[in-house]
Image (cartoon, rainbow, N blue to C red):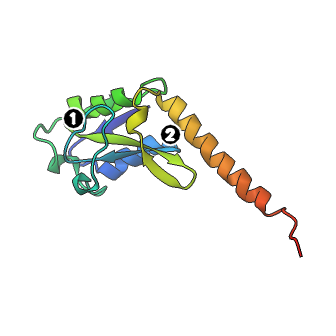
Amino acid sequence: MHIEINDNTTMREIEDTFSDFYPYLQLVFYHKPHKKYEVSTDTDLIHPDTLVRDLRKTHVSSLIEIQPLYKVRDVEKEFQERLGLPVQVLWKEMKNWKLVSEMDDFTLKELNDMARNSSDEFIIESYEEGFEDKQE
């Protein structure tokens, strides 16, 4: 997957493109970078409708390549170093989005598969609950 980023790109467009390829993962952008295995705070969250030009000092178009075997930490590092955009990857666990801090060494494929399996198990449990016999 490649994401083309220019001054008129919104954070939402980057997030949506990423999620099209990894539906159980999500990118979220922040004003301040974080260290490995750290999580960013909600107070530093960048609104998804923010334009790249409003965040970057260098106004050059870029192309980010993201492959399934890239580790979470490498994707986050790429956005930070090449674009100056601090980002964290979230994964979907059942119905909730969770920060990946302790999973920085997982590949995007591994994490997306784990999140899918978590969500699938939740769906199956909910489905099976509908078939339970009611005790009277």
Residue 48: horizontal and vertical position, in percent?
Answer: 31, 55
| Front residue of 128 and 136 | 136
Q: As drawn, which residue projects farthest toward the bottom?
A: 136
Q: Residue at x 26, y 53 (%)?
A: 45
Point out the image quarter for the C terminus.
Answer: bottom right
The Cα–Cα distance between marks 1 and 2, rounded to whole angstroms, is: 21 Å
Query: Which is nearer the N-term, disc 1 or disc 2?
Result: 2
Q: Is residue 48 above or below residue 61?
A: below
Q: Judge the density around disc 1: few (<14), some (14-19), many (≥20) Cα neighbours within 10 Å.
A: many
Q: Is residue 135 above or below residue 56?
A: below
Q: Which quadrant would residue 18 be assigned to in this image?
A: top left
Q: Is residue 45 above or below residue 100?
A: below
Residue 7 point in image, percent of width and height:
20, 45
In the picture of the structure, the residue carrying the numbered disc 2 is: 22
Whether residue 129 sits left or right of residue 54 in the image: it is: right
- Vertical side of 65 occupied by 38: above or below: below
Residue found 27% across the figure and 51% down from its top: 41
Instruction: Estimate how packed mark 2 is, as few (under 14), some (14 to 19) or many (20 or more) residues with alpha carbons within 10 Å.
Output: many
Q: Secondary structure at mark 1?
A: helix
**Secondary structure type for disc 2:** loop
Mark 1: which amino acid? Leu
**Quick one: which residue is furthest to the left in this view?**
57
The x and y percentages for residue 14 are 35, 44
| Circle 1 residue | 83
Query: Residue 79, image x and y in percent?
Result: 27, 34
Q: Nearer the viewer, residue 128 or 31?
A: 128
| Residue found at x 23% / y 49% | 8
- In the rendered image, the quadrant that contains the N terminus is top left
Kindly identify the amino acid type of the residue bearing the numbered disc 2: Tyr
